[in-house]
Image (cartoon, grey):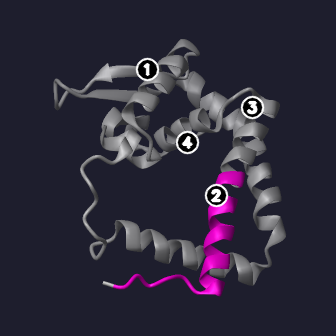
Amino acid sequence: MEPRWLTDEEQRAWRAYRDVTHLLEDALDQRLRQTEGVSHLYYSVMGVLSEAPDRRLRMTDLAAQLKIPRTRLSYAVGRMEELGWVRREDSPDDGRSQLTVLTGEGMRTLERIAPSHVATVRATVFDRLTPEQTRVFGEVCEIIRAGLTGPDRPPLPADLPWRR
């Protein structure tokens, strides 16, 4: 089958997207480290847990939501445990699974650093867009996400990083 090469406009859009995803993740991480002494990954772990029922999730579910390998998550959670931001518990439903729980100290830390994170997101993304561009940006991201996660998406390989 002949490949469907990207048009010049598609190539421009793809490269801009690729570059912005890497640059934005780096900018968010650097800014949180400089202003709060916290990595973007730790912030993301606390953010996901703060929205979970009882502020707890199975490690495998947390890795899947963050789209990172379980080994990387395990290391991060171990460090966050030392800081008192999370704790691990055995799952009452499955003796093989562990839950990660956001502690009160972790929630306070998240609430303290969230304004800095939001300010960076606002300055790097939304302050540069008009309201109409923000609406279109959201729609485009939702369409792409649905194509990757919805019922019509191709089957995901078994060796995805968060399944390892």
Q: CA distance from mark 1 to mark 2?
A: 31 Å
Query: For the residue labelled by badge 2, is the local secondary structure a helix, a strand or a loop?
Result: helix
Callout 1 touching callout 2 (CB < 8 Å): no
Quadrant of the image for the C terminus?
Answer: top left
What amino acid type is highlighted by mark number 4?
Answer: Gly
What amino acid type is highlighted by mark number 2?
Answer: Thr
Q: CA distance from mark 2 to mark 3?
A: 18 Å
Q: Is residue 47 above or below residue 108?
A: below
Residue at 66% x, 49% y is: 25
**Badge nearest the viewer, 2 or 3:** 2
Residue 58 seen in this snapshot: no
Callout 3 touching callout 4 (CB < 8 Å): no
Q: What crowding class fits label 4: few (fewer than 14 Cα within 10 Å), some (14-19), or many (20 or more)?
A: some
Q: What residue is pinned by disc 4?
A: 47
Q: CA distance from mark 4 to mark 1?
A: 15 Å
What amino acid type is highlighted by mark number 3?
Answer: Arg
Q: Mark on residue 21? A: 2
Q: What residue is pinned by disc 3?
A: 33
Is residue 108 one of those drawn in magenta? no
